[in-house]
Image (cartoon, rainbow, N blue to C red):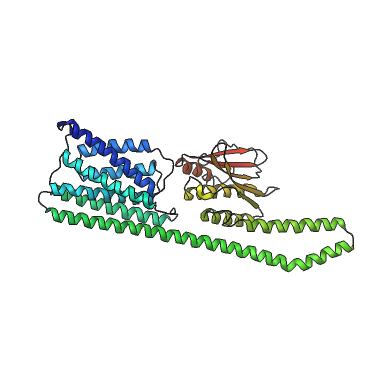
Amino acid sequence: MLNVIKYNPLNATIFILLNLLNVLIGNKIIIKIFNIQKIKESKLLIIQTVLSMFTNVFLPIGVNSIINILVQMILYKKILKLETEKMCLAIIINSIISIVSETLIVIKKSMNLEVVNIVSLMEVIIKLIIITVIKNKNTQFKIEECSNEKAKYKISIISAISLIVIFILKLKLITDINIIPAYLYILFDGIIVAYLVVLMKNILAILKENSINVRVQNLEGSNKRLQENYDNVRAFKHDFNNIIQGIGGLIIAKDMHGLEDMYKSISKECQEINEKQAINGDIINNPAILNLINNKIKLAEEKDIKIKVEVYIDLNSLKVSTYDLCRVLGILIDNAIEASIGCEEKVITIRFLRDKFNNRNLIVIENPCKNYLIDIKKIYEKGFSSKKDKISHGLGLWKVKQILKKNKNVQIYTSRDKMFKQQLEIY
């Protein structure tokens, strides 16, 4: 424990400034590496700086590191909105820097404010070197979001156990700092850093494997859809001769009414084939959303429901987790399909738009609905359902609200006129 009061004001001021710099540069590293957009950085900076000074003053080194890491995990999750896997990587990066810096205490075999300031200065220098390299090399961890829950749990458990064991050992070693030779302590720190680097590589390997699996699944889904489209075109081509002969018969008979009906039928089938072919990676450039919508289109077709998709934005530019967006879209489209069953006009429209005037992106889902008396103010309540079977229903839209609570820049509005309309607004 340090007593800052008994030191001269200059050392105390340096102590505060170095803590502030440490937190500021450390956050810049994480923000840059993970390409984090639009965060309340000042709020994060104040909380971390106050905490860092408090733990450095009132807690022994080792204990303060554990407390700082636990709080960092919460802040990265709540303020930076980092996914579990990215949060673990961010904590490992911070731990490596911290462990390397703290080695100086072993060499000095003491812990007073001057030594702590020198350690903090070393940490600032290391972080400045890292941030300079990141900016010059434009380094980023291009990590696709992990949709595999097992992989997430595996990463979380490995990271948590590793960090707990490491800091318990560190605490023990620091307690016996005057007994253990400095070179052994430095060697131990080197082993820890090496282990953390290997751990980081393993996490990245798990995420890469998950990304490859997701891409394979998306390609399989796209290939299946392409095969269905190809079969439809072949079938249409095979019937073309028969169609021409039918048209010829109608012309000979001068049956204009029959010819008009034949034309409408051909035009409708051509339009359906074109619309099916339009749902591809060139239009929907996010593979997860592409696969989701293609599967929902297939599900709708089985129920004789048509889904129209209009895309006018880059889906990868949306400031929302793909994982969360797929969950929300899946629930909303499933609800739209279910509501369309039994309606006369079974057409669902999904639009991805850009509202430049309000600087936001919109995802609009419109569907027909037989139940015009449904209370749109209550549909997001847990257990609310217009169906008789309340046990199996009534959780979908409630779950949507729970997901969106984590995404402060996303809102949903529901309206009902001739069509039932769900509008996601992403800022």
Q: Position of residue 125 (x, y in %)?
A: 26, 46
Q: Position of residue 287 (x, y in %)?
A: 52, 56
- For the N terminus, the quadrant is top left
The outermost residue toward the left is 179
Task: Report the side of 223 relative to 234 (left or right).
Answer: left
Outermost right residue: 253
Q: Nearer the viewer, residue 300 or 193?
A: 193
Foreground pick, 136 / 237: 136
Residue 58 left/right relative to 353: left
Q: Can you say whether 52 is above or below 230 in the image?
A: above
Residue 272: quarter of image = bottom right
Q: Position of residue 78 (x, y in %)?
A: 39, 41
Residue at horizontal 84%, vertical 65%? Answer: 248
Residue 98 screen position, x and y as percent: 25, 48
Residue at 55%, 55% in the rendered image: 290
Q: Is residue 359 left or right of residue 195?
A: right
Quick one: 18 or 51, which is closer to the camera? 18
Residue 139 seen in the figure: no
Name which quarter of the figure residue 269 lies in.
bottom right
159 vs 211, left or right, is left
The answer to whether residue 56 shows anywhere in this view is yes
Q: How many marks?
A: 0
